[in-house]
Image: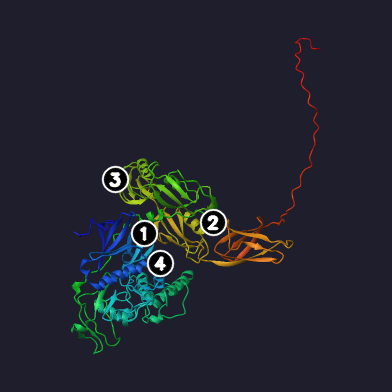
Amino acid sequence: MDKYLGKRLDGRYEIHELIGVGGMANVYRCTDTVDDREVAVKILKDEYLNNEEFIRRFKNESKAIAMLSHPNIVKVYDVSFGDMIQYIVMEYIDGITLKEYIDQQGIIEWKDVIHLTTQILKALQHAHECGIVHRDIKPQNIMLLQDGTIKVTDFGIARFSDKSTRTMTEQAIGSVHYIAPEQARGNATDGKTDIYSVGVMLYEMLTGKLPFDGDSAVTIALMQLQSTPKRPREINPGIPIGLEQITMKAMEKLPSNRYTSAAEMLSDIERFRLNPSIVFDYGNKSFVDDQPTKFVHSLRDSGVDKKVAGDATKVVDMPEDNVVVKEDKFADEDFVKEHKPSYYAIKGIVIAAVAVCAIFFALAMLRGCSTSQAKDVEVPDYVGKAFVSVKENNPNDFQFEVKSEYDESKEMGVILDQEPKGGSMKVKSGSTITVTVNGKDTEVSVPFITNYSESEATQALKDKNLIPEIIYVENTKTPKGYTIESFPKAGVKTTIGSTVYVYVAGGKRTDKVTLPSVDGLTLSEAKKTLVDLGLTVETVTDDDSKEPKDTVLGMTPLQYGKVDAGSVITLTVSSGLGDINTVNIFVDLPSDVEDSVDMTVIVDGAVDSQNSKTLVPKYNKTYTLELKGSGTSSVVIQLDGQAYREYSVDFATTTVTTTASHDYVVPTTAPPETEPTTQYYTDPYVEPDTTVQPVTDDPEL
């Protein structure tokens, strides 16, 4: 039994299970008892605690990832380098490797390949800008989450490009199927080394085949150095020419012929995405590995070789087939087998993926806008209400960021506080509201509801502050109206307010719908197309896209797949924030005012203090107001507190429209006029007569 299972590291990290075995370290799924979250802990193997080279690589990985902060790169939370144990605490990723996904899918549809590759390149662009070269990019080191997000992992052999950029002279590091020629030779490595590996992955995803494969690592390495792969379109004619060109350019043998950076490759991919029929004006002249990355020692010391083609090249028979070789000279190399191969354990990442209904779970976490144009609404007051009821009754599609505090005097799941406060301001529909929910933890375990009646299951979930969503399915073994199972399954921890899908027996089997492609359409057009097919639409925004606001960039599940009628489809749309422009507004000032006036500029309801200032219209007939932004904005100009001009600004088209114009009234300092005083005459005081009169019935008296 593994000696770490059931133990707690530094009194904080409880180790539950082994989820990955690598060449120099093992990866465990753990619970961080301080922050109460699942984490992955990578522990250096005991046999390498005294090996300076492995310790250097292990520390190098922690330093490399700690410097990086990007949504497509695995996060590092903590590190520990003691004498008895060395470990790195990282983000726990519940997904599968890109290699597993390629093996499942075979050939991946090219639009999906673009989606995946773009994320990988964005991660590499960030790493390269921080001076870090990964040097081991391969599908086994790329994690694919259930919602289609990519996470780049394993920076174990990364190098800082502003320091040593040369592979060690006596050994090459990397994976033979994806290694760049210069890295195999032991030459200098930089960002272009990672670009080559991305090109190989592109080739593999588009064709379902590796560009080079053979019986041994030596054969594959020789092909990487000297051979040209088949063009992708020879294997898969459905690949557009432009995408084939991008792939082959990334795989050029000479680094100088490849893309100079990940950003440049991203630029060409974006050009291709906008125009799939594009043909680039460059020419490419050259162009799965289940084994882990390994060292390959120079075999000049082995004395074991055989002549293959004259005296120029020497090769040895090698029993291992995942060895990366090094070439010191292109025309005269010694290729040798790994020295003491038993010394190095097989490195691989084996992470179990929960795939059942994964798409539904991911989509339930995302809530989008219900209309293509967000409207201004007043922030509701949620304090004192149950969070589960707030999420169920959310007509303005607010996003909720949940924090947790515990107040024993309040019921569990009740909202204790919120930001912005209720009634304090107006926000766009779909905006994010931070709520503090009463609970010892923001996570709860899904209760056991199998064989419950529909009403019992619904109530059990609501009692846990979870939102039930009923899905009727055909089932002959479970009585009609009773639950078959739930997703997530019983016992799984999920966030308070999350949706739990309850599968109830007795409903009709839903029809299958083939998803159309809606990329490039506006959100309203895409919604109509999908709703007409009987599907439910949610949205998530992309702030990095340069596309106009509400342009559809992609969807989950991916297009051309088949889903049940009524399924939830998540559209990724451009927020327009990536398309920032500068516009000038020429404000005409009142010509008949000689004194100074205080000009206040209000943009979208907020005072722009930078542009607000005091002006003298006598000397400033026109004031030029410069604004920078994206999308559309409303601008109000006030003079001495009076509304003067109102504009509508479209940053995408850089157009300014005057929507209202008001006259400026010069303030006066004269005292206010008073009404004339009215005098009233008062009679002298007369004492009333208090004489008692006799009572009589005579009306005359």
Classify residue 434 as left or right of residue 52: right
The mark nearer the N terminus, 3 or 4, is 4
Residue 119 marker: 4
The mark nearer the N terminus, 2 or 4, is 4
The mark nearer the N terminus, 3 or 2, is 2
Residue 59 vs 330, above or below: the answer is above
Task: Please count the marks in the image.
Answer: 4
**Separation (CA) of disc 4 from disc 1:** 15 Å
Dot 1: element: loop
Q: Amino acid at mark 3?
A: Lys
**Separation (CA) of disc 2 from disc 4:** 28 Å
Q: Quadrant of the C terminus?
A: top right
Dot 3: element: loop
The mark nearer the N terminus, 4 or 1, is 4
Classify residue 675 as left or right of residue 457: right
**Separation (CA) of disc 1 from disc 3:** 30 Å
Nearest the eye: 673 or 643: 673
Residue 477 marker: 3
Nearest the eye: 285 or 667: 667
**Residue at image coords 30%, 60%:** 40
Q: Amino acid at mark 4?
A: Gln
Question: Disc 3 vs disc 4: which is toward the camera?
Answer: 4
**Separation (CA) of disc 2 from disc 1:** 29 Å
Residue 373 marker: 2
**Which quadrant holds residue 227?**
bottom left
Disc 1: which residue: 146
Dot 4 surroundings within 10 Å: few (below 14), some, or many (20 or more)?
Answer: many
**Separation (CA) of disc 3 from disc 4:** 44 Å
* Label 2 close to label 4 by CB (< 8 Å): no
Dot 2 surroundings within 10 Å: few (below 14), some, or many (20 or more)?
Answer: few
Q: Amino acid at mark 1?
A: Gln
- The image position of residue 2, as x and y in percent, is 20, 60
